[in-house]
Amino acid sequence: MERNYATYPSLQDRTVFVTGGADGIGAAMVLEFAKQGARVGFADIQPDKAVAVIDQCRHAEVVHVPRFYEVDLRDIDALQAAFTAAIEDLGGIAVLVNNAASDDRHTWQEVTADYWDDRLNTNLRHYFFAIQAVAPQMIEAGGGSIINIGSSSYMMQETMFPGYAIAKSAVEGITRTMAREFGADNIRVNTVLPGWVPTDRQLTKWWSEEGEAQTLEDQAIKRRIYPDEFAQIVLWLAADDGAACTAQQFLIDGGRF
């Protein structure tokens, strides 16, 4: 279905940084921000997919072509160096979208101490250190918006990836703690949680006919929820339109809960 989404004048020329922006929901957010005229930087570990995202933005004839920073977000020094480079390349970052994650399947029996650390490093730790990297210049600029992408998996009591679900549940703790920390500095911090979104990764690695049928039965809206739809609430939170909203959690799942 063709959708006529809102345009946010306040996002024109606003600098946005998205982690995990080379595919899936992250790529959709990069494209949607670029369509708004924002100056977008994004980090990922997948340079080939990043090129495809940039080509998609060029095809959409965006005003500012996004800048890609290849970095493994588990390497905190490299992560913070990427933010330093982005601030120099694009200007002060007004919007941070903490998105990068990996929902690899595993059972509780097979989790080792090293794998546990990897799940938290992949799905949680870099959120905090990304905030640490951008907050000082947001404070100096007089405000900003931080949007943490969570997951509804822990709310559903999913059993297929305990390390992932537990890490994602802690995203809400980061949001509420840092929203209070930065409220006086006019920095807003919110969480957005996707339900099941049929990205290429989900369809290639995890999809089953039975699983999708159960999802649609559980949802109030009886259709798939797409990445560009999910991105719209993130745009609103990044724009001036969401200026009074902080410490909140938004669930975009077609009414599954």
Image: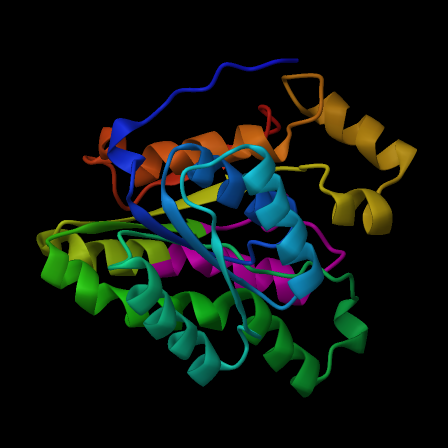
At 56% from the left and 41% from the top, the residue drawn is 58
Verify whether residue 18 appears in magenta.
no
Identify the residue shown where x is 52% and y is 81%.
75
Q: Is residue 227 left or right of residue 40?
A: right
Depth order, front residue of 207/28? 28
What colour scheme governs how the chains and residues are painted in the rendered image of this protein? rainbow
Residue range of the region highlighted in magenta in the rendering: 149-174
Q: Is residue 20 above or below residue 83?
A: above
Q: Residue furthest right?
A: 209
Residue 131 position by quadrant: bottom left
Of residues 186 and 118, the one nearer the viewer is: 186
Q: Quadrant of the N terminus?
A: top right
Q: Position of residue 24 (x, y in %)?
A: 65, 46
Horizontal relation, residue 17 to residue 30: left or right: left
The quadrant the C terminus occupies is: top right
Nearest the viewer among 257 and 58 is 58
State the residue at coordinates (30%, 71%): 132
Q: Position of residue 256 (x, y in %)?
A: 62, 28
